[in-house]
Amino acid sequence: MNIERKIIILVDDIKSNLDQGRSILKPFYEVYPASSASKLFTYLEKFIPDLILLDIKMPEMDGYEVIKKLKTDPRFEPIPVIFLTAKSDESSEYIGLSLGAADYVSKPFSAALLLKRIENQLMFAHRANLLRETNANLETALKMAKDATNAKSKFLAYMSHEIRTPMNAIIGMSKIAMRTDEVSKLKYCLSNIENSTVHLLGLINDILDFSKIEAGKLTLDHAPINIEKMLMRTSGFIIEKAKEKNIDFSIVLGTGMRMNYMGDELRLSQVVTNLLANAVKFTPDNGKIELTTDEIHKENGYSILRFSVKDTGIGMTEEQKERLFTAFEQAESGTARKFGGTGLGLSISKNIVEMMGGKISVESEINKGSEFIFEVRLERPEQSDAENKHEAEPERETGTPDFSGFTLLLAEDVDINRIILISLLEDTKISIDTAENGLVAVEMFKRNPEKYGMIMMDVQMPDMDGYEATKIIRSLDIESAKAVPIIALTANVFKEDIEKCIKSGMNGHLSKPIDDECVINTIKRFYNINGK
């Protein structure tokens, strides 16, 4: 069958009519003659034609009965039918068109006119098919949109619960702390507040990461990674949570794999952290979790690393596994209520893994546990492991540093943020001057530029923001204006936000909420250069 030519079935019980029709149509179309209705339906079981030319007066089943049968079958209903008959009265034509015929041609007919009518009907049928396909695609898209809307509605309901839960703990524990003078109770309240804020920050980070993925703005860094150190740092908080449930947690590194690669350590550790956190969450007391990694393939300066997180948790059904990596979904609605979570973590992890040239999958059985496996493609640096092993580890300083004689200019418009930073640094003996916006900060620096060893600048402030203030300071005709370290303080944590800070003339970036260790390490880095 020549699929490039349109297919026509010609139905007539008179052989001479079939021969005449074939001679007219054959130069232009693929023609299949049928001497009866039964022959027509035999053809239709084998293939669907583009058009049917149908005689009305035939034995066994006439043309009217045939078209009734065609139009009641969804497979054949779209096929255009042209009656080609000796019946030329108005009543016969009316009946034929009423039954669904596309056209009605009376014999004797003009060959040129018949070909034109066929051409028109094929064109109309093509347009109708396109319209049906478009409508079907629109219906599919509408269903997908409705499903996505329903999923997001459920997600918002979950998020309302998830956000309110730690907020309730924070507010409640704060009220309890304010009503007591017992040190033990105060510490208990503060510990719960800290745990709740960490959980709340994790929820916010998931939402921000997913919004970046949807906008196509999530990018990967390319920097050295030591897999062993990364896994030890990543699993640090998991070990404590595992101890609380008496879970046996272990890390297994491939015996022949190297440890040093190039890639995005933060995002890689984010995937591992998410899988470990889920494993701890869904593994009952006295269970077992094993984190393994190995190099399974290498070529052209790249390696494929395989990571596995295996647990003895609650497990999943096949249906639950199918929608596990879908955004706003969890294994089941009861899971969110019982164990919490945004339903975004695994979707984000899947996107990160795929951006790293890999894939992620899960094997699971109800009440027997789950194993999440993902692979990523990382560059192998030229430096050998032997050389890396001899690299000197930076010495870790313990205790509170002494920043005596070092003055910090803090530009921050929110009172509580200034109080928090001053309190966090109180024991370091650092001197801190404060400005409520960028404009004040610029004037204070102009008056005494040699006083300040560092400026910490919030980027969003009234009157003048941190970006503009930094640019002005850098443009001053003062020697120290070019050299004074300026560090951004901001809740904007995306890569482009950090790049914007650097582009404006800043030397670094500290994200909110402020981590006291990060602040101290940042000051220490510049204090060692500019300290007095």
Image: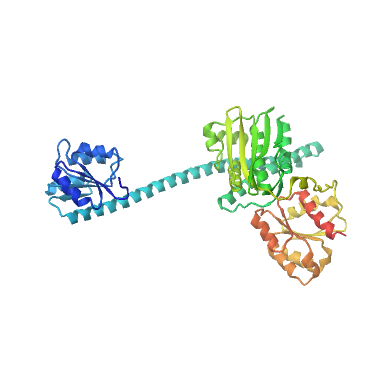
Looking at the figure, which quarter contains the C terminus? bottom right
Residue 410 left/right relative to 303: right
Residue 91 left/right relative to 130: left
> Is 324 above or below relative to 503?
above
Instruction: Name the residue furthest bottom.
Output: 477
Instruction: Pick the residue in front: 151 or 254.
Output: 254
Picture coordinates of residue 230, whole percent (x, y): 72, 43
The answer to whether one can see residue 479 in this image is: yes
Picture coordinates of residue 141, whole percent (x, y): 44, 47
The colour scheme applied to this rendered structure is rainbow
Instruction: Name the residue furthest front.
Output: 300
Residue in the image at 65% along x and 47% along y: 267
Looking at the figure, which quarter contains the N terminus? top left
Picture coordinates of residue 101, whole percent (x, y): 22, 46
Residue in the image at 14% along x and 43% along y: 15
> Is 344 above or below relative to 530?
above
Picture coordinates of residue 200, whole percent (x, y): 66, 44
The answer to whether one can see residue 464 in this image is: no
Residue 515 left/right relative to 118: right
Image label count: 0
Figure quadrant of residue 203: top right
Instruction: Pick the residue in front: 24 or 75.
Output: 24
Instruction: Pick the residue in front: 419 or 478.
Output: 478
